[in-house]
Image (cartoon, grey):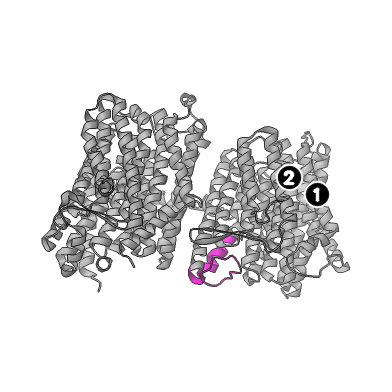
Amino acid sequence: MIDQHVSLLLVVIPLLAAPFVAVLPGRHLAWLATQIITAICFALAIYQLLQVLQGGIISYELGGWAPPWGIEYRIDAANALLAVIIAGIAAITAPYSLASVQREIPQHQHSLFYASFLLCITGLLGISLTGDIFNLFVFLEISSLSSYALISMGKQRQALTAAYQYLIMGTIGATFFLIGVGLLYAQTGTLNMADLAARLPEVIQLRTVHTAFGFILVGVALKLALFPLHLWLPNAYTFAPSVVTIFLAATATKVAVYVMLRLNLTIFSSDFVLKTPANEIFLTLGIIGIIVASATAIIQKDAKRLLAYSSVAQIGYMIIGLGFASIAGLTATLVHIFNHAIMKAALFMAIGAIFYRIGSSRLDDLTGLGRQMPWTFGALIIGGLSLIGVPGTAGFISKWYLVIAALEQDNWLATIAILGGSLLAVIYVWKLVEVLYFKVATSERQDVREAPLLLLVPTWVIALSNIYFGFDTTWTVGVAQTAIKMLGMS
Amino acid sequence: MWMSELPPFVPFFLAALLALATRGVVRQLILLSAPILGGLHLWFDVTPGTLFNLTILEFQLTLMRADKLSLLFGYLFHIASLIAVVFALHVRDTTQQIAGMVYAGSALGAVFAGDLITLFIFWELLAVSSVFLIWARRTERSLRAGQRYLLIQVTSGMLLLAGALVHYQKTGSMAFDFIGLEGVAGWLIFIAFGIKCAFPFLHTWLTDAYPESTPTGTVFLSAFTTKVAVYALARGYPGTELLVYIGAAMTCFPIFYAVIENDLRRVLAYSMINQIGFMVCGVGIGTALALNGAVAHAFNDVIFKGLLFMTMGAVLYRTGNINGSDLGGLYKTMPKTAVLCIVGASSISAFPLFSGFVSKSMVMTAMIEEGYNYLWLMLLFASAGVFHHAGIKIPYFAFFGHDSGIRTKEAPNNMLIAMTIAAVLCLFIGMQPQYLYALLPWQVDYWPYDVTHVLAQLQLLFFSALAFVWLNKQGLYPPELHSVNLDMEWFYRKLLPNTALAIRSGLSSSANLLSRVATGGVTLWREKIINLSFIRHHLAASWPTGSMVLWIGVLLAVYLVLDEFLTKT
């Protein structure tokens, strides 16, 4: 019974739980409920992935209406993997949030915070599972609206501006997406992805379809913070509460990359995409993005902001993989979606633990704290090494496949950008290490102690997973290869 | 003792882990046991032909490939790490102890790597672990030097990775055997090796960073990184003629820098490049005799260069100073160290009966045999130069020369023991070279002690000594001065920042001109665009929402225009 409804439950459980959590009294109950729900979702997501790997694509008809009339949830290995990432990161940030949220968010907002958090999970899971493009837009809005709310809860006043700016940008992006979907609907009369894919070839040469693709492309590019549409991201990540930064950095942009992938492979065929300038745009902006954003990260004065720019650079890697339009490239993109989620989560968690102690993430305030918080610092080092792509960490695996994909097409520029990006990453990770370890702590911060276990344990779980997935690649590379095969790349 | 396929890096990594969990004497015993047990294991259990494979990532990684070449370096690295550990036994710094173990283990991993991936992994580990030995000095200078060092080392790793992948694309094999300078892959890997091997222009990291490390850290550093590179060249590029010229250049150019340098450990760093030059020449010539000479010289160099770095480390440890201008007369208080230093100096100068002689002469003989007469003369000049700056200058300025008045204590016992082990090895190999020759990978009949060789070398040394004495008496010898000598690193330590400054000031002065001519609106633009760096003001700033929206429009327009005009068929 549950078997058949796993996909639906993944979305419905957090959605239904959100209003209850919002009215729960006291600060611990709301947290506890969130914790339980995210854990259930994680278990369901893993179960779903195993099912897909064994039995192939799952198609779920919502309310018993057969597609293309009803909404269909269509799960293959790609989105099953993505659901695992989202639910997994949510499940691991939930225990972290108890202490962190208490420190950073006023108590009367706690229930609201957890409710928004659950809604955000709903939105992201919905995006990844649905097989209906309009339904995807709805979930995109759910996740966006809840993340605006989450970001605005940041401690500093700038959080409000950052959230507002993100709101404006996100809405424009969503509108572009919707315009594109509208144009497609006008041409084909359907919103189901599989059905769209079947009908689009008849009208593929029409200018309208090309334009629709352009609108959708730009809309999604904004959501995934493709350079130069990344400008909302640094502020949002810097001023959001730590937990929100961890969760959004590890999942939100990745989900948008997934949407782009789905768009290119399932809805529009790769043959169609080859006829548009999309791949060239991806490659150009990806390469520029890696170099420019990494260089910008180096001169940052705030640790969260530094990592935010590094995220923009990392998105460049994923987009380059997409731009290669080859099996190797797409595999690399999917693998990096996963690996970047765990490395950025580890880094933001470590910074969040420091923020918990001193209430700031400005580099000037962090001096010497690595010695006083050795465990936090250790996790940060592991995350940093993974970000650089040192062998034995997850980051190396992604870079490995990306470079292989680049060389396969003799694309030297991309190869240089990928490897050069690692060098720049050495510099900005080094900058963190230098401040945290080699500078002397200011006198008023001499008594800063190690972060509490509630923060350390999740941080280390994620940090160690960076090492684990640097060796065992069956769940990353293996699943990604299956996923690309299911998506019909040949 | 253990299974013979156990990769030799494992004991070292285990020791590093165990050392992390222990303190005091237990930790020291663990640190000592890794090279001893590992070395015994290698000597008794491992025979050429041993292989150990592991499949990760759809590739078969060969973690252990034992043949005579890798085994020779394996023995060498065990001896070197044992000496270095003994020398550092008094150190209570966890960072250095762990980094030293991981570093030595990585060097062994690289030498026994049978494929390019494994090589790359250990190549990177070498870089990452060794930089902590530099940072361990904990001075601002060592911090900066370490940073530059790390960047250059990681670049080398990236080049190796790129080269390995291209190699794989072209040949379908990841095996680390003869590569050769053909195609992009060959060149990429060649440059990667060249960086670690301190080729001219790529050598700056060595002279920049090694002298900034701790007294004990430099001993570790001098043993591994460059020798791994020599090994890699001998494996991948034997007989590449270009290497002969590169090697000859490496033997000569450091001499001039070494003569004017004041920091005695930096003098040694330059002489290290000079010695590596001989090995690179040997690899480039590529005959059995030359290759044997190259690896034998690597073997000896690790020991006598280690000995010299140890004596200078002991001086630095006792006096806190390593500038030739401030030292002198230390033989009164550190007589044992002085004697040991002279043994090392004699070895590096290739005095007969010392180890340098038996290996350097192999390379020189091979060079003559292959008809490189002019290059042979360069090497001869370099040999005289070595004697000058390493053989005489180091002991003379540290232990003799003018009496600096420094009165200190003899080096600690553990240091003396380590130095003695190295000195005994220098003498033993020098007098009984047949034992070293028996280990060499290629079959060659060679005996260094014939009349021509010995006489020629002695003449060379005596005239070189005469030159030093004469120059010194005439007051013509470059005096030891407090100074920082920059060579190639001048390009990035001075030229780059200065150019940037000049451009910036040029820009802002021209902008000033502009602002005087134009109205306030232009001034506003100047502030925005030119003042300070572009990145700081534009890419890192928080943008107004309006301009973000502009970018959306731009991107859509670009897509549509491209789609319209560049429609592909």
Name the amino acid type tagged 2: Met
Quadrant location, the C terminus of chain B: bottom left
The chain under label 1 reads B
The percent position of residue A460, horizontal first and vertical second, equals 46, 38
Mark 1 neighbour class, 10 Å CA radius: few under 14, some 14 to 19, many 20 or more: many
Q: Where is residue A120 in the image (x, y as percent from the top left)?
A: 26, 41
Label placed on residue B495: none
- Residue at x 75%, y 48% (from the top left corner): B307
Q: Count the marks.
A: 2
Tag 1: amino acid: Ala
Q: Tell which residue pokes out farthest to the right in this image.
A: B451
Q: Position of residue A271 (x, y in %)?
A: 27, 68
- Label 1–label 2 contact, CB within 8 A: no
Numbered disc 1: secondary structure:
helix
Q: Is residue B181 magenta?
A: yes
Residue B523 visible somewhere in the drawing:
no
Q: Which residue is drawn at 12% across and 63% down?
A: A187
Name the residue: 30% across, 44% down. A233
**Label 1: which residue?**
B423
Q: What element carries label 2?
A: helix
Classed neighbour count for the residue bearing mark 2: other residues with Cα under 10 Å, few (<14), some (14–19), many (≥20): many
Chain of the residue under the numbered disc 2 shown in the image: B
| Residue B331 makes an appearance in the image | yes
Q: Position of residue A100 (x, y in %)?
A: 36, 31
Q: Which is more N-terminal, label 2 or label 1? A: 2
The span shown in magenta is B169-193
Q: Which of A128 and A149 is in front in this view?
A: A128
Q: Name the residue under label 2.
A: B310
In depth, the one of A471 and B382 nearer the eye is A471
Extreme residue in the bottom direction: B371
Q: Distance between the residues labelled 1 and 2?
A: 11 Å
